[in-house]
Image (cartoon, helix red, strand yellow):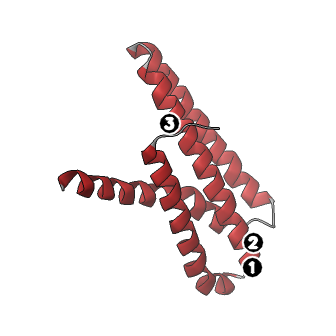
């Protein structure tokens, strides 16, 4: 079992909710773009799953770099950052070449982390101020 923080768990749940909302909203628009609902949904699922994977990698990277000295931590963090973005590139290029997976859905799934992080941050700040 993978150990993740409570914040990461909240992010994953928020990302799932936002992914479902993005799918539901996107259904109204994808027919105009000539994208099938299945392809769009698969894209969102692939993007969401990859975002969860990246979140876990990021958390592990941060936990490990805290235990290192400053120079090694900076090098390690840069390497992990570069690796995560290289993996993102591979996933997006894969979505371009696999016709059953919508690139638009994949991009939405990959980008869902940012609004989820904002929402969880706002919720955490409200919780602390009470």
Tell me if 19 is positioned left or right of 62 in this view. Answer: right
Q: Position of residue 54 (x, y in %)?
A: 58, 43
Q: Is residue 45 above or below residue 77?
A: below
Choose mark 3 or mark 1, whichever is in front: 3
Q: Earlier in the sequence, mark 3 or mark 1?
A: 1
Placement of the C terminus among the 4 image quadrants? bottom left
- How many numbered markers are drawn? 3
Toward which corner of the image does residue 120 lie, by quadrant? bottom left
Q: Dots 1 and 2: beta carbons under 8 Å? A: yes
Q: Residue at x 51, y 67 (%)?
A: 18
Q: Secondary structure at mark 2?
A: helix
Between the residue at mark 3 and the residue at mark 2, the CA separation in whole angstroms equals 30 Å
Residue sitting nearer the eye, 95 or 129: 129
Q: Which residue is mark 2?
A: 39
Q: Which residue is mark 3?
A: 59
Q: Which residue is mark 1?
A: 36
Q: Residue at x 70, y 46 (%)?
A: 90
């Amino acid at each position: 079992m993978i150990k993740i923080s409570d914040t990461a768990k909240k992010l994953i749940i928020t990302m799932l909710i936002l992914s479902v909302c993005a799918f539901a909203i996107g259904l109204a628009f994808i027919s105009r773009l000539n994208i099938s609902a299945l392809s769009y949904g698969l894209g969102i699922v692939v993007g969401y799953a990859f975002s969860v994977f990246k979140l876990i990698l990021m958390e592990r990277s941060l936990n490990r770099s805290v235990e290192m000295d400053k120079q090694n931590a900076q090098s390690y963090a840069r390497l992990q950052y570069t690796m995560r973005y290289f993996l993102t590139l591979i996933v997006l290029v894969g979505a371009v070449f696999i016709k059953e997976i919508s690139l638009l859905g994949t991009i939405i799934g990959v980008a869902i982390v940012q609004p989820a992080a904002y929402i969880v941050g706002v919720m955490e700040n409200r919780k602390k101020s009470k």
